[in-house]
Image (cartoon, rainbow, N blue to C red):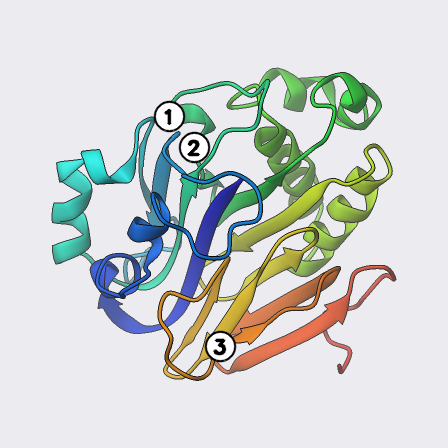
Amino acid sequence: MCRHLAYLGPPCPVGALLVDPPFGLVRQSWAPRRQRYGTVNADGFGLGWYADGDERPARHRRAGPVWADGTFADLARVVRTRALLAAVRSATAGCAPGEAAAAPFAEGRWLFSHNGALPGWPEQYGPLAATLPPADLMSLEARSDSALLWALVLARLRTGAELGEALADTVREAAKHGEGGRLNLLVTDGRSIAATAWGDTLFHRTGPGVVVASEPYDDEPGWSEVPDRTLLLATPAGVTLHPIDRPTREDEPT
């Protein structure tokens, strides 16, 4: 399992979101409070963030634990951003190690993370992988369940699917291939966020901006838990929730 977080809102230091809170993502790498599977997240980490005037995000990823990387401490102190996605990793059995397997995965303006696991990986997922074009399979960034899920999401985004549509369709399809899969997916394009709660915890808080996270990073009021099997859609203006068990248009009311 992993822990991840996305933010949209007024520019703020990365550290104010990931380091300074009493139970921030950096602390969650060794002492998560609500993680149901695994105890630490020391198998890699990553940060993706957006700079003003550039829709393509920058990334900083490493194979080891976030607390061992002095460069991240400097980045968190000086970088300000209006949008980010960050994750700390607890690797699933059978998945590749290394920096390439650490979220966020990226292409163009999109950043992606997966908190969860595909049970029976990789043996049970040949039919799911076969739904992708061969070129997409050959270009997987890492041999991992998260990289496969990202390829499935990305294939939908490339054909014009909205963020939430791409996530919900991928979750519904992946769930057909393994009972008990944990499919908490998170994606942003720097202007909006889509996330799924499917088998593990997900929370959100608004004002100022919006934070979507595996677990609250403090005990202040305002955090709301997302029900299981739910798609979350967020912009700086607010959050809407939709059941994943049926197809959902992103413009329909909740």
Kind of residue indicated by mark 3: Trp
Q: Earlier in the sequence, mark 2 or mark 3?
A: 2
Kind of residue indicated by mark 1: Glu
Write down the residue under mark 1: 99
Q: Kindly state the secondary structure of the residue where label 3 is placed.
A: loop
Residue at (39, 29) in percent of width and height:
43
Mark 1 burial class by Cα count in 10 Å: few <14, some 14-19, many 20+: some
Write down the residue under mark 2: 102
Q: CA distance from mark 3 to mark 1?
A: 31 Å
Q: In this picture, is 207 found above or below 168?
A: below
Kind of residue indicated by mark 2: Ala
Please state the total of marks drawn on the protein image.
Answer: 3
Write down the residue under mark 3: 223
Nearer the observer, 132 or 29: 29
Residue 226: quadrant of the picture: bottom right
Q: In this picture, is 67 found above or below 126?
A: below
Residue 69: image location, x then y, percent: 19, 35
Mark 2 burial class by Cα count in 10 Å: few <14, some 14-19, many 20+: many
